[in-house]
Structure formats: C-alpha cells, structure tokens
Image (cartoon, rainbow, N blue to C red):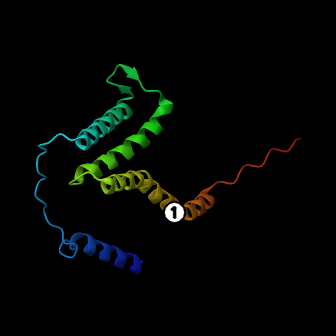
Amino acid sequence: MRKYLAQCVALFLWLFWSSIALAQTILPPPAPVTVLTPAVVIVTLLAVLAGYIAQAVNTGSLFGVVTVPQTWLPYLTLVGSFLAAAVMSLQGAAVVTSVSWFNALLSGLLALGGTSIGVVAHQHVDQPRVTKLRLLTSVPPVPPAKAA
C-alpha cells in the first residue's frame, strides 16, 4: 500500500510540477492562410469528412435524410477516429510535406490503438482479481432433487 501511495504522489508531482522540466511554453497563433494550395484543400476536405462521419455516428443518420445502418457504426467510428487524429496532425504542421503525412498516419494509427492498449492492459491486470472475487462470492449450484 505504501508503494502504491508513493507512486501516486510521484505521479502527481510529475504531472503538476513538470512544466519547467518539459519546457512547456505558449506558442503564438499560426499565421493565417493567404494562399489556397492543394494541400490546404485536401486537409480541409479531410476535416469536413471527419466531421460528417462523427455526425453520422452520433445521430445514426446523415443530416436526418439517410439512416446509417447499425452494422456500419463501428467501422465509421474507426475511420472517423483515424481521420480526426490525422487531420489534427496535418493542421498542426507548418508546411504539409511527406514527413507531415507520415506523422498524420502515425497519429491516426495511435488514435486507433491508443485506447485498446489501455483496455487490454487493464483487463490483463484486473482480470485475475475479478475472477477470484467472482469465485469467492458465487453461490454453488443447487444439486438436483433425487427421485423418490
């Protein structure tokens, strides 16, 4: 228990007092777009597509006109999560180059795998304890009645 509390205190200190160590500063706002390039158009259209996908997943329809089949929702969620992370990465790049596209790909893949990695780790750590509690608190089955 002491080790757990010490780890919690260390995590608290690292999270709340690490701004100097990690050199976190406020960045100036990006310069406004003055030239409409193909890269800007592509990134903007991908952002619009990600927004439409999020709206379709949240409401179950596209603008209330076309109903999205329930079997499509998990796939739309995956595509929307990937696109949202990738577009955020592309919008943060000063110039859209092959490196920024690669970073966008990695951001999208991390968005897909990030939550599943945490869930798998939680289940791996927590499952033996839950199984043990279920076995301890379960009521044994009632034996069948004997024929008279």
Q: Secondary structure at mark 1?
A: helix
- Could you tell me which quadrant the C terminus lies in? top right
The residue depicted at 42 percent of the width and 53 percent of the height is 109
Dot 1: few (<14), some (14–19), or many (≥20) neighbours within 10 Å?
A: few
**Residue 28 horizontal side relative to residue 118, left or right:** left
Which residue occupies the foreground of this view, 32 or 54? 32
The residue depicted at 39 percent of the width and 80 percent of the height is 2
- Residue 90 percent coordinates (x, y): 28, 50
The residue depicted at 48 percent of the width and 32 percent of the height is 72
In the figure, 24 relative to 32: above or below?
below
Which residue occupies the foreground of this view, 70 or 84? 84
- Residue 110 percent coordinates (x, y): 40, 55
Would you name the residue on which mark 1 appears?
Answer: 126
**Which quarter of the picture shows residue 145?**
top right
**Which quarter of the picture shows residue 29?**
bottom left
Which residue occupies the foreground of this view, 126 or 146? 126
The residue depicted at 36 percent of the width and 44 percent of the height is 83
- Could you tell me which quadrant the N terminus lies in? bottom left
In the figure, 101 relative to 63: above or below?
below
What kind of residue is marked 1? Asp
Which residue occupies the foreground of this view, 92 or 96? 96
Residue most extreme to the right: 148
- Residue 93 percent coordinates (x, y): 24, 54
